[in-house]
Image: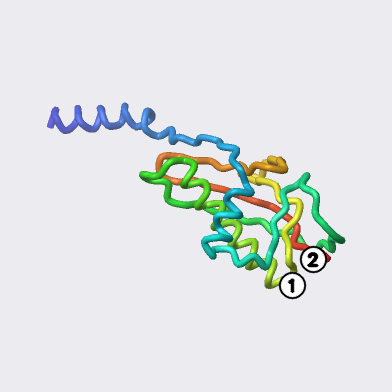
Amino acid sequence: MKRAFAAITLAALMLPLTSHARDTTHHLDFHSVVAEATQAGRLDGSVKFYLAGQSVPGKVERLREAVTNKKTNAFNKSDENACAWVLQSALITLQNAAKQAGANAVVDIVSFYKRNEYKDAQKYECHAGAVIAGVALKGQLARVN
């Protein structure tokens, strides 16, 4: 009985030490992941992606806002690999939303993790932990002529 109580007490004392999960913020190159996903056939190239601050060639007709929040298994992966994978998942979701709306681009894309905007014309924000990595994006579905 005393041993069981001691084991439970020890486990309870250790709980707060293990409950703080890692959440590392990364700012990584957006365009290389888009190119990789397009080359691999995960993105079909019919929808172009433009980060906020990046110039868009042609006339832009904004249709509506789109938001995606994706997570992926990061266990036994480098943060960079997990982040690239989850960004591709978010881009596929935006591509599908754009096609449904009759758009050929997503413009003014910002990272939108926990509803906090991160704007950069070259990089996206990813949060990586020991088990899960996440990317959230917000942008405008648009027709670019």
| Label drawn at residue 93 | none
Using the rendered view, name the quadrant where residue 119 is placed. top right
| Amino acid type assigned to the residue bearing label 1 in the image | Gly
SS class, disc 2: strand
Which type of secondary structure does the marked residue at label 1 adopt?
loop
What is the total number of numbered labels drawn onto the structure image?
Answer: 2
Contact (Cβ within 8 Å) of mark 1 with mark 2: yes
Q: Looking at the picture, does residue 6 appear above or below residue 129?
A: above
The residue identified by callout 1 is 102
User: Residue at image x 85%, y 60%?
Assistant: 58
The disc, 1 or 2, on the residue closer to the chain's N-terminal end is 1
Q: Residue at x 87, y 61 (%)?
A: 59
Q: Which residue is mark 2?
A: 143
**Residue at 30% over, 31% down:** 12
Find residue 15 and report its horizontal and vertical position in percent: 34, 32
Vertical side of 61 occupied by 117: above or below = above
Does residue 45 sit above or below 86 in this rendering?
A: below
